[in-house]
Image: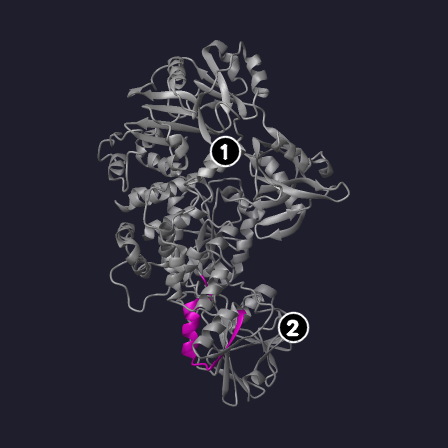
């Protein structure tokens, strides 16, 4: 438990992705089975232990300390799990046995059941130190929230075993905690575990962006083009009565999309874009789709107001036959006839885009015929379906990003290499009347600038600070004085959480407009117009 | 006599009318008794100062030799009489030279703890409980959430991280008086015997600790900035916490920012400061130690000052000890 607690403590405060990977690799390489496998399951969200509710925590601590002192403590710390982990008093009698291993703790919780749950949980807390108590509480209340995705955990496994992450993704949904066979294979002690379960995830093929000179050497006739829809890429697999919907990174998102799963009554694996709306009606925007994302379950009402469907791009497997080695031309033909034969309102075909030359296609991708299209995809007619992001067979050619001129409002010190630089920027646009203009924040960005530009902005921040809040500085941002940042972004979502009522997708700094007076930055209405399109 | 006649707060600090002196005054006064050298307790500009030799030396290092018109060194455990008030200094275990001050008249004894801790610290004398009627305790970490872990375990985490990330410099924020030297001494005790790099602000104090027989091992300046990103790879660099947010820190390659402080117990505190490796090392008593110490002094009344007074006052009430917050202004927690 102590090792796992230490890992969590470090992961949560480590900003760099590479550093997180190293912490994970070190942990997996030096922690024995089955603890490391349980930790892995906890990180990927595959550890299902009977939940401990906040009320139980409060009850347990209420029996152990003065409520006023607890209230002072909770008020100071702000997080229930952390407060309880810190104030938990040492038991009157020293506990039996050493600090429990992760394995032991998980088994005890599994075996406890509802009646004995609280007693068993308290008994475990008695035997742990503060850091391990925090880890156990997080584990048992569900939701580690430590900024490590399931994919990062798989990446660490790949690095540990020197294998491609695609191999792990492909196996993943056929494996179960504590993953003894997986670790044995990664450590070279056993054969690769067989991918035997039905409807497993097949690692996804991804595209590279079209670079400045890429097209000069490419022959338009070698490529098919299709629209790049602005939803999320998914894989729908159905085999021997087992139906699954996976995200691009192989997360199983079936539970949130019963409306799709119910229609997976065939023997095939489809690659497509998840969208909301109806194939024969409106296609909803990404903002609409967000009502369905990142949920564990979904209500009937939401499924009615925001029905999901899949716009199909590719066919990876049909009736037990893998098509991944076949050229796109053949897969496409099979896809067309397969989707054409489905009598389901949950699937349609992403149409191909006819074009004669690159410049004609360029015009199309700049001005696509539908607002939910974010560019075009180019796929070589003769290319097989290869996991990962091979250079050459697939390209994405996005429409140009939106841009907006904003005013820098707040700057925050960065992490790691950037810890002595103000490198995270909050920017705003004007609202209010022309006589009394006011800035409202519309987003945050921390990349898109060169090292030299970073130095310049850092200097501006230090020279123009009007207030400090810990690592954050407010800077002068007035109509007559301020730094204008041109922000590029991919789209806008409505947001109730932000005062501006909108949230930017993928904002980054595209230019520093030292030349532009702050008063001439954009107004909120300009962005709202984009939202209403 | 009433305890509050012997000692009571005034805007300048805690005042003893009978002896006409202040303890740790925050404004210049005629006669000051000073518990330890941290800047919020030890200020320049008093007429006469009575403190331990180490505290006087540290004040001279920080403010120059003329920091007071006259000084007198107090020897630990010896009693001096000031206007009929018996005054004695006792080790507080906080930093080198730190002392509690006992004040006694007509059989009533009050002990002002200053800042103190109970953990073993190779860089200063251990705290000694002094029996008294009224104990004036600090309350920096007076909440049940603060229970400091074993300092050796914290240092092991630092050493482990250096091994795990050998291409990065580990920047350890530690206050220049006390904490920095303790971190160095703990590293030495854990077997780290290579050079430790220190920020210029630490040099004089580290040299002073050495002169008082506290071995810190090889120290090297962290001032070189020759553009060689490999120079500090795998090295431990210790400096005042504020320095790591400054441009000074840019000479270090992809640093791991660590911070040695009792506040690091709270995750959000570490997050807010952008600390990647929090080291929970405090020079103050934690909750359990505050409570134990109150018991050991046998005091029938406790005055609680600078920190989270309300929780400790509550605990005293629950345990039948008379207690009240002593509202003194001007003390921060430089030592942590």
Residue in view at x 43 percent, y 18 percent: A393
Residue under pointer 2: B28
Residue B57 location in percent, x, y? Answer: 54, 69
Q: Is residue A138 above or below residue A158?
A: below
Residue B201 position, x and y percent, is 55, 56
Mark 1 is surrounded, within 10 Å at the Cα level, by few (under 14), some (14 to 19) or many (20 or more) other residues, namely: many
Label 1 resides on the chain identified as A
Q: Is residue A187 above or below residue A473?
A: above
Describe residue A20's horizontal placement relative to residue B175 as left or right.
left
To which quarter of the image does residue A93 belong?
bottom left
Q: How many neighbours does mark 2 have within 10 angstroms: few (below 14), some (14-19), or many (20 or more)?
A: some
The residue shown at (38%, 43%) is A23
Q: Chain of mark 2?
A: B
Disc on res. B36: none
| Residue at numbered disc 1 | A289
Q: Find out whether residue B297 is within the magenta segment.
A: yes
Drawn side of residue A24 relative to residue A431, left or right:
left
Residue B206 shows in this picture: no
Region rendered in magenta: B282-306
């Amino acid at each position: 438990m102590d090792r796992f607690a230490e890992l969590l403590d470090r992961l949560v405060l480590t900003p760099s992705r590479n550093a997180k990977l190293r912490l994970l690799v070190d942990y997996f390489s030096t922690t024995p089975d089955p603890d490391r496998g349980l930790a892995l399951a906890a990180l990927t969200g595959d550890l299902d232990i009977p939940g401990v509710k906040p009320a139980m925590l409060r009850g347990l601590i209420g029996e152990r300390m003065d409520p006023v002192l607890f209230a002072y403590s909770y008020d100071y710390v702000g997080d229930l799990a952390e407060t309880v982990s810190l104030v938990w008093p040492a038991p009157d009698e020293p506990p039996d046995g050493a600090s429990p291993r992760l394995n032991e703790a998980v088994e005890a919780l599994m075996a406890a059941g509802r009646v004995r749950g609280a007693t068993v949980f308290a008994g475990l807390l008695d035997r742990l130190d503060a850091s391990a108590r925090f880890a156990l509480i997080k584990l048992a209340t569900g939701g580690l929230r430590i900024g490590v995705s399931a994919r990062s955990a798989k990446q660490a496994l790949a690095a540990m075993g020197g294998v491609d992450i695609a191999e792990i993704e492909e196996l993943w949904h056929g494996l179960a905690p504590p993953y003894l066979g997986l670790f044995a294979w990664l450590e070279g002690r056993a054969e690769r575990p067989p991918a035997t379960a039905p409807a497993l995830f097949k690692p996804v093929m991804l595209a590279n962006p079209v670079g400045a000179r890429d097209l000069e050497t490419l022959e338009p006739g070698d490529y098919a083009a299709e629209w790049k829809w602005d939803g999320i890429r998914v894989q729908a697999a159905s085999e021997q009565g087992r139906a699954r919907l996976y995200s691009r990174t192989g997360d199983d998102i079936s539970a949130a999309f019963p409306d799709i799963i119910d229609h997976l009554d065939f023997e095939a694996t489809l690659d497509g874009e998840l969208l909301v709306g109806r194939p024969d009606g409106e296609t909803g925007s990404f903002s609409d789709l967000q009502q369905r994302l990142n949920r564990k379950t979904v209500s009937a009402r939401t499924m009615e107001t925001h029905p999901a469907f899949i716009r199909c791009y590719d066919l990876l497997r049909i009736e037990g036959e893998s098509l991944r080695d076949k050229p796109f031309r053949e897969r496409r033909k099979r896809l067309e006839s397969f989707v054409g034969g489905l009598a389901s309102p949950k699937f349609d075909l992403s149409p191909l885009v006819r074009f004669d030359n690159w410049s004609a296609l360029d015009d199309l991708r700049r001005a696509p015929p539908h607002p939910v299209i974010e560019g075009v995809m180019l796929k070589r007619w003769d290319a097989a379906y290869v996991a990962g992001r091979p250079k050459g067979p697939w390209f994405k050619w996005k429409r140009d990003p939106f841009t907006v001129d904003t005013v820098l409002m707040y700057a925050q010190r960065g992490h790691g290499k950037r810890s002595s630089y103000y490198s995270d920027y909050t920017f705003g646009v004007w609202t209010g009347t022309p006589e009394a203009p006011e800035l409202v924040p519309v987003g945050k960005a921390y990349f898109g600038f060169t090292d030299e530009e970073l130095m310049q902005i850092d200097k501006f921040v230090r020279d123009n600070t009007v207030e400090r809040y810990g690592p954050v500085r407010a800077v002068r941002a007035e109509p007559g004085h301020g730094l204008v940042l041109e922000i590029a972004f991919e789209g806008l979502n409505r947001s109730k959480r932000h005062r501006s009522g909108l949230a930017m997708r993928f904002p980054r700094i595209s230019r520093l407009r030292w030349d532009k007076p702050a008063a001439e930055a954009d107004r909120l209405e300009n962005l709202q117009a984009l939202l209403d399109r | 006599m009433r305890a509050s006649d012997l000692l009571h707060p005034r805007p300048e600090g805690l005042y003893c009318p009978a002896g006409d002196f202040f303890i740790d005054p925050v404004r210049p006064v005629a006669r000051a008794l000073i518990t330890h050298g941290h800047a919020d307790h030890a200020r320049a500009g008093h007429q006469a100062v009575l403190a331990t030799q180490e505290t006087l030396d540290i004040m001279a290092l920080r403010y120059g030799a003329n920091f007071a018109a006259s000084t007198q060194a107090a020897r630990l455990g010896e009693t001096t009489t000031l206007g009929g008030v018996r005054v004695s200094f006792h080790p507080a275990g906080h930093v080198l030279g730190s002392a509690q001050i006992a004040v006694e008249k007509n059989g009533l004894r009050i002990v002002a703890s200053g800042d103190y801790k109970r953990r073993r610290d190779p860089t200063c004398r251990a705290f000694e409980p002094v029996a008294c009627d009224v104990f004036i305790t600090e309350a920096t970490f007076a909440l049940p959430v603060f229970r400091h872990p074993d300092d050796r375990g914290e240092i092991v985490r630092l050493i482990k991280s250096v091994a795990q990330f050998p291409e990065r410099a580990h920047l350890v924020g530690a206050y220049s008086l006390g904490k920095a030297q303790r971190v160095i001494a703990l590293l030495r005790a854990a077997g780290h015997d290579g050079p430790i790099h220190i920020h210029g602000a630490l040099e004089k104090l580290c040299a002073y600790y050495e002169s008082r027989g506290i071995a810190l091992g090889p120290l090297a300046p962290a001032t070189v900035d020759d553009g060689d990103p490999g120079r500090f790879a795998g090295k431990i660099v210790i400096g005042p916490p504020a320095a790591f947010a400054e441009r000074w820190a840019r000479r270090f390659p992809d640093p791991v920012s660590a911070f040695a402080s009792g506040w690091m117990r709270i995750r959000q505190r570490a997050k807010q400061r952008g600390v990647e490796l929090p080291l929970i090392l405090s020079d103050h008593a934690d909750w359990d130690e505050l409570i134990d110490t109150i018991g050991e002094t046998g005091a029938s009344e406790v005055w609680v000052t600078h920190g989270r007074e309300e929780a400790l006052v509550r605990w005293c009430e629950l345990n039948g000890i008379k207690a009240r917050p002593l509202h003194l202004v001007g003390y921060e927690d430089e030592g942590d």
